[in-house]
Image (cartoon, helix red, strand yellow):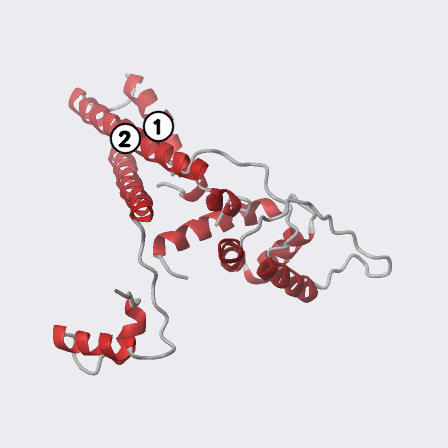
Amino acid sequence: MRLIAPQFVKPFVKSNKNDANDAEAICEAAGRPSMRFVSAKSVEQQDIQSLHRVRSRLVSCRTQLVNQLRGLLMEYGIVLPQHVGQVRRGVPEILEDESNKMTLLGRRLLASLYNELVDLDSKVEQIEKELRAVYAASEPCQRIAAVEDKRGDPYLRTLLIHGAQSVVYRACRKKDVRSVWIVDKQRRLGTTRACVAVANKNARIVWSLIARGGALPCAARVYTPRPGYAGKLNFRAVEKTLASQAWKTLCVFHFSTARDDGFSDRFHRDA
């Protein structure tokens, strides 16, 4: 059995979408000599993907719950900042405050929603423990983790973008070549495009680490301007150098020391 990505089959659909036309398009695509096929997942890989999907649903439910909590509290004139941590800390204080306008019924409803939030937090934490156990037992995962936080799957793109955001936000406090390149990208293109550029580069590094093996050396290289250059850096040269190093998995990076074991604050900005 061979698998083909749907976007590679769609160009061969001749008319309206139906089972017969889809089957004909699949046969046409499968006969192409240059067609790229998708490797079938093993049972273990399917288990890991299931963990991520369940966690993604729980985080989405938690975000919806936090937004509902904040919206209901606004009706009483109580405003909480936009972050799940702020809601965790703020709701117990609101329940204990007898000077606000909330009635007994409103307090019971708020307490029920807060207990639901605590339950969702517990479920997310349990899933993350399972993911950390998978990470600890997987040597390829440990090699990929050397990249500063990680085209295809939308969830994978989400992880790549969120990881890149963390790198971009910390780059201004560093002086190595890659951070200087990131800061220049951010200044010229804006934060969002700079994050996409970093995510694209990290995706290529991750692919190279998996496909070719080896480890990513963790060494900092501080940028020091040469005399007579007035502190200017040839960013195009740096970009070419970094790209070449990425493909060879010989990149010289200054890795962020701010790592945590949790996934929630690292990959998602809830609410």
Q: How many marks?
A: 2
Name above or below for residue 266 compared with residue 223: above
Contact, mark 2 vs mark 1 (Cβ under 8 Å):
yes
Label 2 sits on residue:
117
Q: Is residue 145 left or right of residue 5?
A: right
Foreground residue, 64 or 154? 154
Residue 14, position as x, y percentages in the image:
21, 83
Please report the residue visible at 18 percent of the width from the left and 74 percent of the height from the top.
23
Tell me which corner region of the image, top left, top right, bottom left or bottom right, holds residue 257.
top right
Nearest to the eye among marks 2 and 1: give it: 2
Residue 219, position as x, y percentages in the image:
68, 45
Q: Disc 2 and disc 1: Cα gap in Å?
A: 8 Å
Which kind of residue does numbered mark 1 sit on? Arg
Residue 203, position as x, y percentages in the image:
49, 57
Of helix, strand and loop, which one carries label 2? helix
Label 1 sits on residue:
88
- Residue lying at the far right in this picture: please name it: 227
Foreground residue, 119 or 269? 119
Q: Is residue 239 left or right of residue 206?
A: right
